[in-house]
Amino acid sequence: MARAKYQVLVIPYSIDNGGIHYCLFCRSDSDIWQFIAGGGEDSDESVLSSAKREASEEANIDFHNEYIGLDTVSSIPANCFKNAKALWGEDCYVIPEYCFAVKVETKKIVLSAEHSKYEWCGYEEALNRLKYDSNKTALWELNCRLKKTF
């Protein structure tokens, strides 16, 4: 299958007596903390389906969990992706990253080989650990939404 010309970002979160917690993932190939990220696999897959598939593949999160579509959309430089020119042509400079949050009832995550470890954090700690601005912006939006209803 060809990789679709977009990226998804998924933030797992949990609400319990201790408050709101967000799950961060450390990449296996570097010491970078981020949320679940990946791309669509073909033109027939919806953006939400891509987010659910990535969450399932990378963290064994069930497709039936409650997903929230976030307003945050970022642009990712195409050169961040292997074979970008072959996939999308020389005139593709950026691709959109669509953001989602998924509520999980259990904090037990089963990792894929893409990540070496995960940690549940409060908002401030998560914000300080994240590397990418797109992750930080999506986290800020989600935290604002959850605090409003919490």
Image (tube, rainbow, N blue to C red):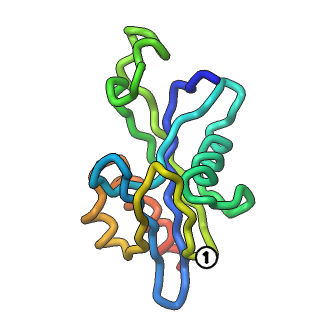
The residue nearer to you, when weighing 31 against 134, is: 31
Q: 126 or 30, which lies in front? A: 30
At 53% from the left and 63% from the top, the residue drawn is 12
Q: Is residue 15 above or below residue 69?
A: below
Residue 7 or 143: which is nearer the viewer? 7
Residue 121 left/right relative to 43: left
Relative to 90, say whether 51 is above or below: below
Q: Amino acid at mark 1?
A: Thr
- Residue at which label 1 appears: 106
Badge 1 element: loop
Identify the residue at image location x=43%, y=54%. 115
Residue at far bottom of view = 17
**Quadrant in the picture for residue 84:** top left
Residue 71 visible from this viewpoint:
no
How crowded pointer 1 is (Cα within 10 Å; few <14, some 14-19, many 20+) is rated as few
In this view, the residue farthest toward the right is 64
Q: Quick check: can you spot residue 2?
A: yes
Point 38% across, 9% down: residue: 90
